Image (cartoon, rainbow, N blue to C red):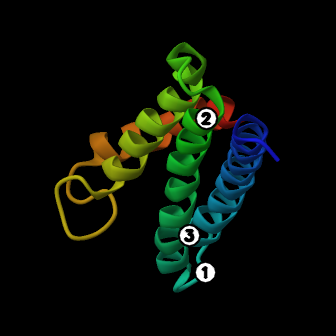
């Protein structure tokens, strides 16, 4: 399998895993909202894996598009916005969201945008 085909397959697979992972993330945080104890840690840990899928999507796109950098625009946007979305959960304090509810709301508001990019 050549480099471009491998990169295209990697881009598609990692983007699909990111989208599926985001759906699981919504399930996990909904369980926390409706009173399940201890699921917040699973949500946080699984979020790190989903963030890795954003980055791997972009790296696979780089592999596929080398040296046509313009073809990596959307995977790059996914990696950047996904990283902003992931790291905004930790703004201002020890726990997710910290003491800044506006930043945590921003974290939640980016979820549909990142999901559409992954799809």
First in residue order: circle 1 vs circle 2: 1
Q: Residues within 10 Å of mark 1 (few under 14, many from 20)?
A: few
Q: Residues within 10 Å of mark 2 (few under 14, many from 20)?
A: many
First in residue order: circle 3 vs circle 2: 3
Q: Secondary structure at mark 3?
A: helix
Residue furthest out toward the bottom: 38
Q: CA distance from mark 3 to mark 2?
A: 23 Å
Picture residue at 56% right of the left edge, 50% below the top: 56
Above or below, 25 relative to 57: below
Picture residue at 82% right of the left edge, 47% below the top: 1
Check disc 2 and report the residue beneath it. 61
Above or below, 94 relative to 14: below
Q: Residues within 10 Å of mark 3 (few under 14, many from 20)?
A: some
Above or below, 93 relative to 40: above
Q: Secondary structure at mark 1?
A: loop
Q: Left or right: where does residue 116 sit relative to residue 29?
A: right
Percent across and percent down for residue 102 are 29, 40
Query: Of the residues tagged 1 and 3, which is closer to the observer?
Result: 3
Query: Of the residues tagged 1 and 2, which is closer to the observer?
Result: 2
Check disc 3 and report the residue beneath it. 46
Between 40 and 116, the residue placed more toward the observer is: 116
Picture residue at 54% right of the left edge, 65% below the top: 49
Q: CA distance from mark 1 to mark 3?
A: 16 Å
Percent across and percent down for residue 104 are 35, 47
Q: Left or right: where does residue 13 sit relative to residue 89?
A: right
Locate the C terminus and report the quarter of the image it occupies: top right
Residue furthest out toward the front: 2
Check disc 1 and report the residue beneath it. 36
Give the quarter of the image for residue 103: top left
Percent across and percent down for residue 27 are 69, 62
Between 40 and 61, the residue placed more toward the observer is: 61
The answer to whether the residue labelled 3 contacts the one labelled 2, judged by CB atoms less than 8 Å apart, is: no
């Amino acid at each position: 399998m050549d480099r471009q085909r491998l990169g295209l397959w990697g881009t598609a697979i990692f983007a699909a895993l990111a989208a599926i992972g985001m759906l699981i993330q919504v399930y996990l945080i909904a369980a926390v909202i409706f009173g399940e104890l201890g699921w917040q840690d699973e949500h946080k840990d699984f979020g790190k894996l989903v963030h890795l899928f954003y980055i791997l999507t972009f790296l696979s796109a780089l592999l596929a598009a080398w040296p046509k950098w313009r073809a990596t625009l959307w995977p790059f946007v996914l990696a950047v916005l996904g990283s902003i979305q992931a790291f905004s959960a930790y703004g201002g304090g020890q726990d997710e969201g910290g003491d800044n509810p506006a930043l945590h709301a921003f974290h939640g508001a980016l979820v549909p945008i990142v999901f559409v990019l992954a799809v």
